[in-house]
Amino acid sequence: SLAGKTAVVTGSTSGIGLAIARAFAKEGCNVVINGFGDAAAIETERTKIEKEFKVKAAYEGADMSKPAEIAALIHNAEKTFGSVDILVNNAGIQFVSPVEDFPTEKWDQIIAINLSSAFHTIHAAVPGMKARKWGRIINTASAHSLIASPFKSAYVSAKHGIAGLTKTVALELATFGVTVNCISPGYVWTPLVEKQIPDTMKARNLTKEQVINDVLLTAQPTKQFVTVDQVAALAVFLASDSASQITGANISMDGGWTAA
Ligand code: NAD
């Protein structure tokens, strides 16, 4: 059982990360939530988790583009709860633009948040996991870790990178009871998807309905969005003892997108 373990979920004030943090809390884990947003709204989510699931929930505002803050997030979690047993690297942002117009600072920011932050959390959390001979590292990758779409050069590069990092660290930790996997969702209905609609409308000269039906769900053979709770359920499974022999895997949950 996962009860009493500690789960750190980066980028968990919203969307997939929040659903994953809540799912681990439901399993009896103490959780560390992280991400940006309105302070009062975050505090409401934090206390809601504690009351609903009878666990401890801490909030850390570490910016996933700042290596020193990321290391402090892991060390604070270890100090507060005694260990980081489950690490979910989920924070991510998107930016949509033709490559020749893609702002250099946006490229650097996406590589930092969507890829390098996972290196920094792993770097800080692995010594404890190795010492305790148990750990679960789960990275939120994307269908874009396997295939590309135009105008998303930084995001696709970062997500392909996270798939490589996942495999490498899985090999390094294979004999230490620590598994490392990534989940690759297709389109999940979250603020991240909602917010990229206006830019895609501009980049491709389409209406909102055309973006949803002809760009987003066109790729997804089921013609349905993945839900955040479905992604969270897979994360919980990957942390379970039943999944102890799944490591270095990139598991798709994309309505058939990457099968096409
Ligand atoms: P979201 O925008 O709802 O949530 C992103 C979270 O990351 C938020 O909590 C936000 O505050 C946090 N965040 C952003 N920048 C940060 C920073 N610098 N430091 C700390 N936290 C930061 O998005 P989401 O759709 O839930 O995305 C979560 C993950 O899932 C991302 O890695 C994304 O690439 C991936 N993903 C999403 C989809 C999708 O369709 N929504 C599909 C595949 C993969």
Image (tube, helix red, strand yellow):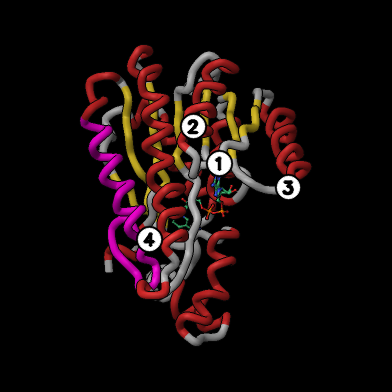
Please tell me whether the stretch drawn in magenta is mainly helix, strand or loop. helix
Percent from the top left, x then y, of residue 125? 41, 24
Mark earlier in primary sequence (1, 2): 1
Image-quadrant location for residue 234: top left
Label number found at residue 68? 2
Q: Which residue is mark 3?
A: 38
The CA span between labels 1 and 3 is 15 Å
> What amino acid type is highlighted by mark number 1?
Asp
> What amino acid type is highlighted by mark number 2?
Ala
Percent from the top left, x then y, of residue 192? 55, 60
| Residue 68 visible to an observer of this rendering | yes
**Helix, strand or loop at disc 2?**
helix
Q: Which residue is mark 1?
A: 63
Which span of residues is magenta-colored?
A: 144-171
The CA span between labels 1 and 2 is 9 Å
The CA span between labels 3 and 2 is 23 Å
**Helix, strand or loop at disc 4?**
helix
Q: Which residue is mark 4?
A: 154
| Residue at figure coordinates x 52%, y 39% from the top left | 10
Measured along the vertical axis of the image, is residue 65 above or below residue 159? above
| Residue at figure coordinates x 26%, y 38% from the top left | 248
